[in-house]
Image (tube, helix red, strand yellow):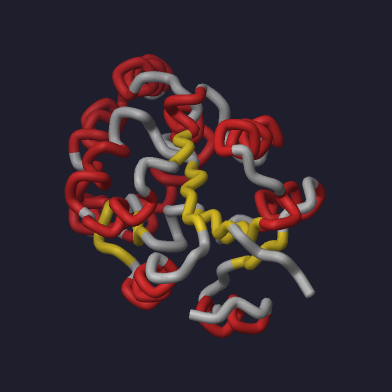
Amino acid sequence: MMNIKNIIFDFGGVVMDWNPRYYFRDYFKDEEKMEYFLKNIVTDEWNAEQDGGRTLEEGTEIQVAKYPEWEKEIRAYYDNWTTMLKSDIPENVAVLRKLANTNLELFGLTNWSAETFPYALINYDFFELFKGKIVVSGTEKMIKPNPELWHLLLKRYEIKAEESVFIDDNQKNIEVAKSLGFICVHIKEDTDLEKELRDLGIAF
């Protein structure tokens, strides 16, 4: 029988519905042009650099210098970031709220810019359930899937991987967490998080 004491949540795609298309679909009114922009100009890799600690201003200026013809659109990215954060993911937040009423400890481990995360913290009350036990990549200047970020979480809060369930929507992050000894739940479109946790023997 597993001795589970901790539940660790990734945020984007697990409890928060963030997608730049929520803003740029209305901006471009042209699906093809929007997809080109998101895949080639403001790429996931570029955004990840800001999640890893680079400032939004520096990231923006770097891309504007590379792609001056897209300057207006590039500047619009972080200027309209809150529109991209559409809402929470209610079914998973409901599970989080139930877990908060158990003896399990709750943690956050997220790839998120240190500059934009405070907005989510202020505007979504469920983040209070973590009681400040959140590791933010932008603050720590390293991002998942770097194993050091998990090691930092374990050390900072004096917990053990084998007693912890890690929940994430990113396959690579799940693979790394498994290799470090975490029990993992991979969130996909049809994942029933409550059922997955109950199947692990968690009662709530």
Quadrant containing the N terminus in the rendered view: bottom right
The single residue placed furthest to the front in the displayed view is: 103
Q: Nearer the viewer, residue 72 or 197?
A: 197
31 to 135, vertically: above or below: below
Q: Quadrant of residue 174?
A: bottom right
Q: Nearer the viewer, residue 176 or 63?
A: 176
Q: Quadrant of residue 122?
A: top left
Q: Residue at x 43, y 53 (%)?
A: 11
- Can residue 3 be seen here? yes
Left or right, 124 with respect to 39, comes to left
Can you give x and y, in whole percent of width and height, for residue 118 in the image? 26, 37
Q: Residue at x 33, y 50 (%)?
A: 20
Q: How many marks on residues?
A: 0
Left or right, 51 with respect to 165, comes to left
Can you give x and y, in whole percent of width and height, for residue 161 in the image? 71, 49
- Can residue 46 be seen here? no
81 to 59, vertically: above or below: below
Q: Residue at x 60, y 56 (%)?
A: 170
Q: Nearer the viewer, residue 164 or 117?
A: 164
Q: Quadrant of residue 17?
A: bottom left
Q: Residue at x 45, y 23 (%)?
A: 53
Left or right, 117 with respect to 170, comes to left
1 to 132, vertically: above or below: below
